[in-house]
């Protein structure tokens, strides 16, 4: 699923993990920022696995990939980083 919108914070709903009957839900978030992504305050379950640069629609971005393995059939607080 691709979600794109300008924002000063990063938010992603984790509500679907509650209805997953599998033992785990794997979440991968690719965050594009104009400058370096500040990973302070990441939820403990999320780790940075890759960083790099890319061009998207003619603009340059820093890319940070965050991954998490979350227990299924459990309610998780929505992912949110930033102001």
Image (tube, rainbow, N blue to C red):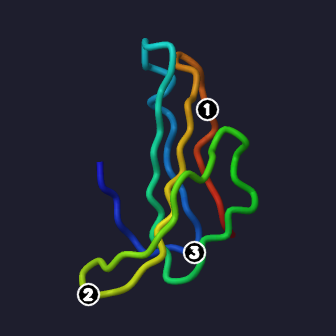
- Judging depth in this view, the residue of 50 and 66 nearest the camera is 50
- First in residue order: circle 3 vs circle 1: 3
For the residues labelled 3 and 2, the Cα–Cα distance comes to: 21 Å
Write down the quadrant of residue 83 in the picture.
bottom right
Task: Report the residue at 60% width, 26% height from top.
Answer: 75
Q: Position of residue 12 (x, y in %)?
A: 50, 50
Indicate the secondary structure of the residue bearing disc 1. Answer: loop
Task: Report the residue at 48% width, 75% height from top.
Answer: 62
- Tell me, for residue 8, which label it has, or none: 3
Q: Which mark is nearer the camera, 3 or 2?
A: 2
In the rendered view, would you say 43 is above or below 16? below
- Report which residue position mark 1 lands on: 76
Task: Report the residue at 44% width, 14% height from top.
Answer: 22
- Report which residue position mark 2 lands on: 58
- First in residue order: circle 3 vs circle 2: 3
Indicate the secondary structure of the residue bearing disc 3. Answer: loop
Indicate the secondary structure of the residue bearing disc 2. Answer: loop
């Amino acid at each position: 699923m691709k979600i794109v919108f300008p924002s000063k914070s990063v938010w992603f709903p984790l509500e679907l993990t509650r209805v997953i009957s599998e033992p785990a839900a794997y979440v991968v978030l690719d965050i594009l920022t104009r400058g370096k992504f500040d990973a302070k305050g990441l939820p403990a379950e999320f780790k940075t696995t890759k960083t790099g640069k890319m061009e998207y629609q003619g603009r340059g971005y820093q890319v940070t990939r965050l991954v998490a393995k979350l227990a299924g059939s459990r309610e998780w607080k929505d992912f949110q980083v930033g102001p």
